[in-house]
Image: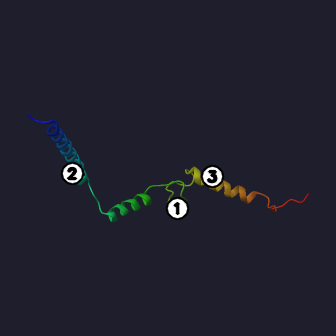
């Protein structure tokens, strides 16, 4: 016949065993995860940045200027600035 202390010790041991098994399963799944060297990862990031068009950064635009609305807006602003009359910074009244 087991005492309360024996039953409690068995339950504690089972809980510890379950936690160790869960930790072991997490570590095994981490070990199976695909790993690549940092240099390969950096190369992939650089390749993505160079090949993916970003329409907000002018030097990586891949669209022709007539299709890129941001480029058209920049051209419009540049033209409107050229056609504004040159005034000084102050008005004397």
Q: Is residue 11 left or right of residue 52?
A: left
Please name the residue that numbered disc 2 is placed on. 28
Residue 7, percent from left and from top = 15, 37
Name the residue nearer the viewer: 53 or 67.
53
Work out which residue is located at the far top of the displayed protein and give it.
1
| Residue visible at 89% across and 60% down in the picture | 92
Which residue was labeled with disc 1?
Answer: 59
- Tell me the element at label 2: helix
Q: Nearer the viewer, residue 1 or 52?
A: 1
How crowded pointer 1 is (Cα within 10 Å; few <14, some 14-19, many 20+) is rated as few
Please say which color scheme the image uses.
rainbow
Q: Secondary structure at mark 3?
A: helix
In the picture of the structure, the residue carrying the numbered disc 3 is 73
* Coordinates of residue 67 in the picture (x, y in percent): 55, 50
Outermost residue, left side: 1
Q: CA distance from mark 2 to mark 3?
A: 54 Å
Q: Are marks 2 and 1 in contact (CB under 8 Å)?
A: no
Quadrant of the drawing holding the N terminus = top left
Q: Residues within 10 Å of mark 2 (few under 14, many from 20)?
A: few
Give whichever of discs 3 and 1 has the lower sequence position: 1
Q: Residues within 10 Å of mark 3 (few under 14, many from 20)?
A: few
At x 36% / y 60%, what residue is drawn?
A: 44
Marks 2/1: CA–CA distance: 45 Å
Callouts 2 and 3 close, C-beta under 8 Å: no
Task: State how far apart marks 3 and 1 are (Cα).
Answer: 16 Å
Which circle's residue, 2 or 1, is located before the other in the chain? Answer: 2
Q: Residue at x 72, y 58 (%)?
A: 81
Q: Is residue 76 left or right of residue 43?
A: right
Marks 2 and 1: which is nearer the front?
2
């Amino acid at each position: 016949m087991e005492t309360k202390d024996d039953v409690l010790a068995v339950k504690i041991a089972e809980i510890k065993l379950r936690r160790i098994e869960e930790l072991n399963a997490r570590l095994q799944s981490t070990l199976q995860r695909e790993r690549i060297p940092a240099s390969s990862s950096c190369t992939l990031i650089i390749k993505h940045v160079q090949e993916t068009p970003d329409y907000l950064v002018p030097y990586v635009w891949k669209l022709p200027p007539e299709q890129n609305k941001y480029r058209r807006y920049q051209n419009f602003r540049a033209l409107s600035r050229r056609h504004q009359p040159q005034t000084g910074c102050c008005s004397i009244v």
